[in-house]
Image: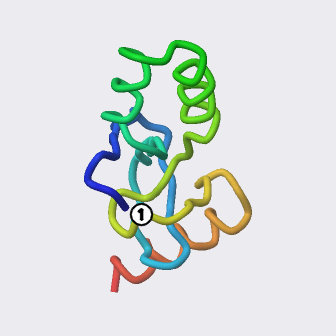
Amino acid sequence: MSANSQFIVTPKPQYIRTHCGYAGSRISYTLGSFWLEVFLWLFFIVPSIIYSTLRLTARKFICPNCKNSYDSCDSHIGKNLLKDLNKNDDS
């Protein structure tokens, strides 16, 4: 990931990560460079519109722990993972 990436914390619902086991809120990750977008807006209007549109449509939600995709706790996989996680916490 580049240093120019922006992270926005989103409120609940809960999500669980199948790989790292993180259970909590997801974060929004915007691909591309913020500074390149600013440069394009200052000097090149048409390319800046295209670049901004591509950045916003390519936004994805990731795990704040391992920066990979997530599963909803309402899904079948998410429910099974939460059940296993709660079972391990009770032990």
Residue type indicated by callout 1: Lys
Quarter-wise, where is residue 58 in the image?
Answer: top right
Q: Is residue 77 above or below residue 15?
A: below
Quarter-wise, where is residue 60 in the image?
Answer: top right
Pick the front one: 16 or 26: 26
Q: Which residue appears at 41% of the width and 61% of the height?
A: 23
Estimate how packed mark 1 is, as few (under 14), some (14 to 19) or many (20 or more) residues with alpha carbons within 10 Å.
some
Q: In this view, does 40 lie above or below 31?
A: above
Q: Is residue 51 above or below residue 19?
A: above
Pick the front one: 21 or 85: 21
Q: For the C terminus, give its image quadrant.
A: bottom left
Q: Which residue appears at 41% of the width and 45% of the height?
A: 27
Look at mark 1 in the image and give the residue it sits on: 67
Residue at the far right in the pictured view: 76
The percent position of residue 10, horizontal first and vertical second, equals: 40, 34
Residue at the far bottom in the pictured view: 91
Q: Which residue appears at 56% of the width and 60% of the height?
A: 70
> Regarding mark 1 in the picture, which secondary structure is present there?
loop
Q: Which residue appears at 35% of the width and 57% of the height?
A: 64
The percent position of residue 14, horizontal first and vertical second, equals: 48, 47
